Amino acid sequence: MSRRYYGDRFIPARSSIDFDWANFLLMGSGSQSQTRQEKTDDTLYRQRLSALMTMRNRNRILSFWSNPISGDLQTDLSDFAEKKPSKGRRFIPKSAERILSAPDILDDYNLNLIDWSSSNYLAIALSHRVCLWDATNGVGFDFMSINGDIGPITSVSWAPDGQHIAVGINNSTVELWDVTSSQKLRTLQGGHQARVGSLCWHDNVLTTGGKDSIIIDNDMRIRSHHVRTYKGHKAEVCQLKWSNSGKQLASGGNDSLLYIWDRAMASRWLHKFEDHMSTVKAIAWCPLQSNLLASSGGAGDQSIKFRNAQTGVCLNSCDTGSQVCSLLWSKCDKEILSSHGPTQNQLTLWKYPSMAKIADLTGHTSRVLFMTQSPDSCMVATAAADETLRIWKVFETPEVLTTETTYAEPFRNLNYIR
């Protein structure tokens, strides 16, 4: 028997329908038994039709349920969500933790006279001598001095190992000292023709900047230490800062110029900025964003500018209202600290990038010329023309401390050099 296909149309097979019985049920019969049977069949029919077609066990056909899970089976996932502890507003002391005397410190905006070592010693140059303060036990002492005819001392900078310190002098030389033995290891001379007011270390290389507008890289591992010269400034070099990667060097000068030098470009500058209105002394690389550089000028400028060091684009500029002498970044938050001159001679903590003022720290009675940061990054030391050295609790200690860096000994061949 062949099958017939009707596609997707439903065609009832009328041959199977008993029309007589259907007519009898519709029209009724005279007997009571038939009537009762009719009512029973009709009731069953309506019940089944109601259950299948109206779906009385459901709310609505194709309804959008607001909650597909019954209430007794719901689970409040928020109870199990990991909640990040809220960071409360920290307390920043408005006064210094400690005040030390700094007699005979030079009131010279272009110099760099304090630095804090990785071994927790604070060095400060006071005219013709360098004094050290042990921040661990609070003991201070005279470390070295020079003759009056070659002085005064114009800059100090600790080596990364925290055991050696470089001292720039007014007679254009740089002396290298061992703090442990209190001995002078060597003298760098012949490179500069005027005082050396800025120093900056990167590994075994000491970069020096002088009043002769020259910048020199000195490799402390070799006898002929002069390995590279940077020329671009037209006046005294007031500040030098290597980036965290050591690939770029930022320099500021008394000619109101800011340079970014690329180490791979053989002493050629990568960017030259001329938008500062006075001496560029305050320079700081952001430790949390490698290409972010902050810089500021003196009394005629009063602004802090933020740049992308790779592209040279100025990202932001903030008018501070007074001379900016130095800048320091926090190592755990996007915050930057600036030290100022008249009229308030204050320290100002800013939130980056909004540059909303967080706090003003006052106490100095003269412009705050120099600023440096402790090894744990939370303490800041400032020195001003009022001949005081003040220690402030400004930043938070980083939650995750980086692994201690082991520095290669840069002076192991010193006996051979001498």
Image: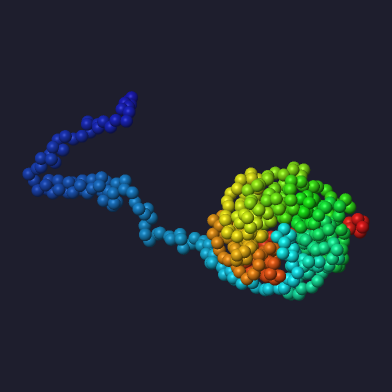
Q: How many marks?
A: 0
- For the rendered model, the colour scheme is rainbow
Residue appearing at x 40%, y 59% in the figure: 73
x and y percentages locating residue 145 in the rendered image = 83, 67
Question: Would residue 117 appear left or right of 225 to someone viewing this image?
Answer: left
Q: Is residue 216 visible?
A: yes
How far across and how far down the image is residue 256, in percent?
68, 51
Image position, residue 79 (x, y; %) = 46, 63
Query: Which of 415/170 is in front?
Result: 170
Q: Is residue 309 left or right of residue 112?
A: left
User: In the drawing, does residue 411 fall left or right of residue 62?
Assistant: right
In which quadrant of the rendered view does residue 77 lie? bottom left
Q: Position of residue 407 (x, y in %)?
A: 78, 58
Residue 289 visible here: no
Say which residue appears at 71% left-offset and 53% top-offset: 254
Q: Residue furthest top?
A: 2
Position of the N terminus by quadrant: top left
From the viewer's perspective, tell me whether residue 188 is left or right of residue 371.
right
Q: Residue at x 25, y 47 (%)?
A: 54
Q: Is residue 66 above or below residue 108?
A: above
Q: In what quadrant of the picture does the C terminus appear?
A: bottom right
Q: Where is 23 relative to 103, above or below?
A: above
Towards the viewer: 386 or 65: 386
Residue in the image at 38% along x and 55% along y: 69
